[in-house]
Amino acid sequence: MSKKNFEIEVVVETPKGCRNKFTYDASDGSIRLSSVLPAGMSFPYDFGCIPNTKEEDGDPLDVLLLMDAPAFPGCRVKARLIGIIEAEVNEGSQVVRNDRILAVAIAANDYAELKAMKDVDKNLLNEIEQFFVSYNQVRGKDFRILGTHGRRRARHLMESRTKRKSLRAS
């Protein structure tokens, strides 16, 4: 698989350090305020989605984007797939898959050495996982991690969740 096959375009929804949770509306390309996190809680990294994909919960695939400084809602960022945190969310009586893609901005300096999941520090990965557990817990949902996997599995998931024509390398 070539290097280009691991490049994606991410739409930033919520910037790093933000308490406001924004959501990308695929129907018109707008960004909408979805919720506000409790005091003392904020997104540890930019959080966004991959346009033209659809996860089981009906939203585009989620991406946690590692880069040097926060972007802004609606910003499109070329990124390199690192891997995936496979998870499911229990929303009352319904359990749905809600995986999180991990990616690094192509232009990033601080994270330039991260090429694959094996390069991600275990403490950093644990902190990211715990954020998602806590984030969902305050929203009354149970977020259960099923496992973490590399970029090939992440790419396969993206391809299986593409709504329109096949993914093109960014």
Image (cartoon, rainbow, N blue to C red):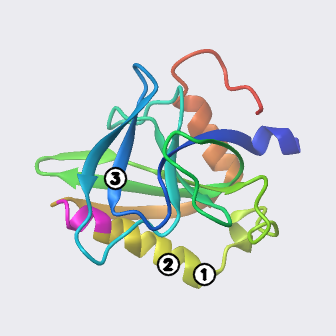
Q: Is residue 30 left or right of residue 162?
A: left
Instruction: Classify residue 136 as left or right of residue 108.
Output: left
- Outermost residue toward the bottom in this view: 123
Helix or strand or loop: what does disc 2 sit on?
helix
Q: Disc 1 designates what residue?
A: 122
- Residue 68 visible, this angle: yes
**Which of the pair 97/7 is nearer the observer?**
7
User: SS class of the residue under badge 1?
Assistant: helix
Say if 28 sits above or below 7 in the image: above
For disc 1, the neighbor class at 10 Å (few under 14, some 14 to 19, many from 20) is few
- Circle 1: residue type: Lys
- Quarter of the view holding residue 34: top left
Q: Which residue is mark 3?
A: 21
Asked whether disc 1 touches disc 2, contact meaning CB atoms under 8 Å apart, the reply is yes
Q: Earlier in the sequence, mark 3 or mark 1?
A: 3
The residue under label 2 is 126
The N terminus, quarter of image: top right
Locate residue 40, reporting x and y percent. Answer: 29, 78
Q: Is residue 127 above or below residue 149?
A: below
Say which residue appears at 75% left-offset and 42% top-offset.
Answer: 7
Percent across and percent down for residue 130 are 39, 75
The crowd level at tag 2 (other Cα within 10 Å; few <14, some 14-19, many 20+) is few
Residue positioned most to the top: 165
| Range covered by the magenta-colored residues | 135-139
Q: Is residue 116 left or right of residue 11?
A: right
Q: State whether the magenta stretch is mostly helix, strand or loop.
A: helix
Q: Amino acid at mark 2?
A: Asn
